[in-house]
Each structure stands twice: as structure tokens, then as C-alpha cells.
Amino acid sequence: MNQEMLRTWKPRFAEVVEEAGFELLDVEFVREQGDSILRFYIYHPNGITVDDCEIVSKALSPKLDEWDPIDQHYLLEVSSPDLSRPLTTDRQLELNLGKEVEVGLYQKRDGNKQWVATLVSFDDETFTLEINGQEQKWERKDIAKVRPHITF
């Protein structure tokens, strides 16, 4: 299953996940350790438990059997996005507004390629970040990766 097919199927997948009481943040089809995996990342404001993943898996499994969107053997996996996972969709970014994020750049800016900033806002072309109390607009095309900042 390629990225275009995933985009085509994502609304149907999202509907099943929502009927189960959760929100679909992302879906990916990857090869890991010789296995093909159809992985769903789900969200709920109260967090995600193993039982929640099982509920969504049981809701998706018969639909996937019925729709048969993938013409090869694969494993179904449902999880919450881990804290180190990049924020790849606008919805994931929305959930992190006002929070600290790690921003990786393609090229250095003021001598650094890695920044920790508060995500203030974003649109299709820019991110507004607060760094050291100052808001700055950065071009989205210059940013390689954004992910939640983990403080220990």
C-alpha cells in the first residue's frame, strides 16, 4: 500500500476509529523486521490504554477483511503515538499548540539545527514559535522535523 492509497483509505479508517470512540491521528504501512505492518495511531483526550488499542483493533479488523485494501499479508497494529514520534499532521500539531516542541532544521539558523520552542501557531506555510520569550515565524519548508519536547 503506497502513500496515495493510504490517503484514499484514511477517511474510511477514521470513521471506524471514531465509531469506536477515538480519533485517528495517522496511519502508516511499513516494513519492519521482514513484516508488513498496517499501523494506526489513535488519540483520546484521556489518553490511550492497551484496552483502547484492543477495542479499535477489533473494530478495524472485520472492516479490513471486508474492504481488503491490501493485496498482501500484513499485521494490524493500533497504538498511541509515542513521545519521540514526529508530528506529521496538522491535527497532531493542533494537539501540541502551547507546548514545547523540538524543531529540527535542514540548515543551521543562528548556528543551530536543533531548537526547543513553544509552538504558538502554524499555517500551510509557516510555524510561529516562541523562543526565549520572543515569537518568530519560520518557514515550514525549512523545518525537517517537529516532535514533542521531553523534559526529565
Image (tube, rainbow, N blue to C red):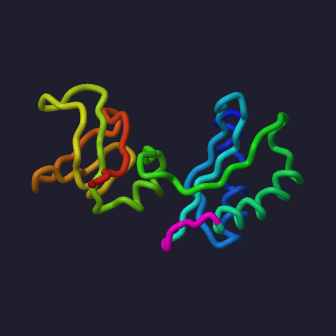
Report whether 13 appears left or right of 65: left
Query: In the image, what residue occupies the spot 48% across and 51% down?
Result: 82
Q: In this rendering, would 70 be left or right of 139?
A: right
| Quadrant position of the N terminus in the picture | top right
Query: Is the residue 93 above or below the residue 47 in the image?
Result: above
Is residue 97 on the magenta stretch?
no
What residue appears at the point 54 percent right and 63 percent down from the top-left corner? 43
Would residue 86 be seen by someone viewing this image from the given angle? yes
Image coordinates of residue 104 in percent, x first then y, are 30, 36
Q: Which sits in the foreground, 84 or 86?
A: 84
Query: Extreme top residue here?
Result: 107
Residue extending farthest to the front is: 152
Q: Judge whether residue 48 is colored magenta.
A: yes
Q: Quadrant of residue 57?
A: bottom right
**Residue range corresponding to the magenta coloring:** 45-50
Q: Which of 118 and 33 is in front in this view?
A: 33
Q: Residue at point 60% right, 59% down?
A: 24
Give the left or right position of residue 2, taking residue 136 as reference: right
Tell me if residue 50 comes above or below residue 144 in the rendering: below
Above or below, comparing residue 33 to residue 116 in the picture = above
Residue 134 appears at what percent x and percent y?
A: 11, 53
* Quadrant containing the C terminus in the rendered view: bottom left
